[in-house]
Image: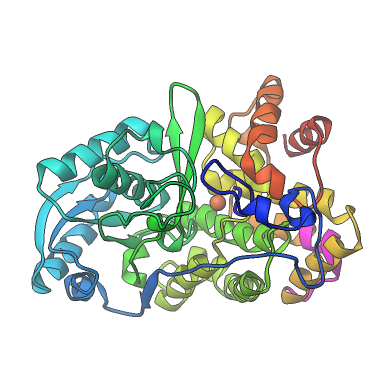
Amino acid sequence: MEWSGAGPNDDRAALLPDDTADPNARQMAGFKSFFQYASPTRVIAGRDLLGSTGFEFQKEGAHRVILVTDQVIRGTGLVDKVEAGLTDGGLELAGVFDDVPQDSSTEVVDRCAEAAKEAGADSFLAVGGGSVMDTAKVADAIFSHGGTAREQEGFFLMPREDDGMGRPLDIAPLACIPTTAGTGSEVSMAAVIKDPEEKVKLEVADFPLFPRLAILDPESTRTLPPRVAAATGMDAMTHAIESYVCLEWNPHQDGRALQALRLIRDNLERAVETPEDDDARGNMLVAASIAIAIELGSVHAMSHPAGAQFGVPHGVANAIHLPHVIRFNAVGGADIANRYRDIADVFDLDGAEALADHVSVVVEHLGLPTRLSQVGVPEEGIPALVEGAMGDGTTLLNPREPSEEDYAELYRKAL
Ligand SMILES: [Fe+2]
């Protein structure tokens, strides 16, 4: 995803020195000519927090809340606890939209916005994984400013006080209670929504989409199936690694990424193997929320089309692609290799090759698929995947520029 790139409402590139305006400026060390960093979401983390949901969300201006979730989560009883926490804090529950599928779509988002209007809500509370949280974010934008899900696509395109560089208009207060430890959507300004007609994933990002509040309580991931905990945990690991080794690296994010990797190193396998371990699950929730960045690279570029075209779960796709992309990038220059060396140090490993091997071992330990052919991707699918990866915004941020042939080779290796 582009962050410093120029969009129609974003002419910062024109104000910057040439080397930063050029997305191919491959500066991977030293003092950067330009970076920006924002992380305005209030995070509360700890035990037994669900009962405080209303008390905390009321501080963000919520009165009548629409709760967005999916039917699986609703069936676990978690939503009942959150609802009780809302009303205990003096908030009203305007309605529950529990129709979010595993991979949400533009049509679902439009219906969610409509449900919020019909219920007379003034705020959104997402209780779920990435699909639920992204649905709530984009539905909130539509609820607040009109339009359809498709019309929200793009970066920094939300309505502003006046044309051009004006401050973006707020959306209704949004709080998130993540039930997976991976996407980090609860603290990010981005959302990814499937457009089933075009078979692509629409990316939406702008500052108002930062949730006002994220509640991280291990109770929320208590019933998470180990397979999902493993896949989403690998998504978090991929965020940390890609954000550290992408063109938009920055010292603020570097610190977060390395600390996220320490937490993932110490807790991911524990959380999957012993699901009753509240400490491990709590630490994974924290890790996911600090690993997230909008700046990513070719792992995500390859995984987005694998999800859109073949339904490969996002974390599984990342787990498969990550070792191959590490090897591809690491030979792109000494500065890139040095960045992988920092990451390898966290795992007490020597360099990028050892890191790539280690990632494969972890993926196997976690019981996840290691090849695309195991998750329904045929060899004939590669050309369309390559096209999708080349067109994905995250390709622009990869530290080594991949060609079509490079992507084809990477997909073949992952097959
Ligand atoms: Fe991701």
- The spot of residue 69 in percent (x, y) is 27, 50
Magenta part, dominant SS: helix
Name the foreground residue: 31 vs 222. Answer: 31
Q: Indicate whether 57 appears above or below 157.
A: below
The residue under the point 66% across, 73% down is: 258
Picture quadrant of residue 359 = bottom right
The residue under the point 32% across, 46% down is: 141
Name the foreground residue: 19 vs 104. Answer: 19
Name the foreground residue: 349 vs 40. Answer: 40
Q: Indicate whether 16 appears above or below 257.
A: above
Horizontal relation, residue 22 to residue 115: left or right: right
Task: Tell whether position 353 is magenta.
Answer: yes
- The spot of residue 398 in percent (x, y) is 73, 50
Judge whether residue 110 can be spotted in this image.
yes
Name the foreground residue: 143 vs 389. Answer: 143
Q: Indicate whether 282 appears above or below 111.
A: below
Horizontal relation, residue 171 to residue 415: left or right: left
The image's colouring method is: rainbow
The residue under the point 74% across, 35% down is: 411
Horizontal relation, residue 208 to residue 270: left or right: left
If the image is split into quadrants, where does the C terminus sit? top right
- The spot of residue 396 in percent (x, y) is 70, 45
The residue under the point 67% across, 35% down is: 389
Task: Tell whether position 190 is magenta.
Answer: no
Please report the bounds of the magenta region as a residue range.
Answer: 347-356
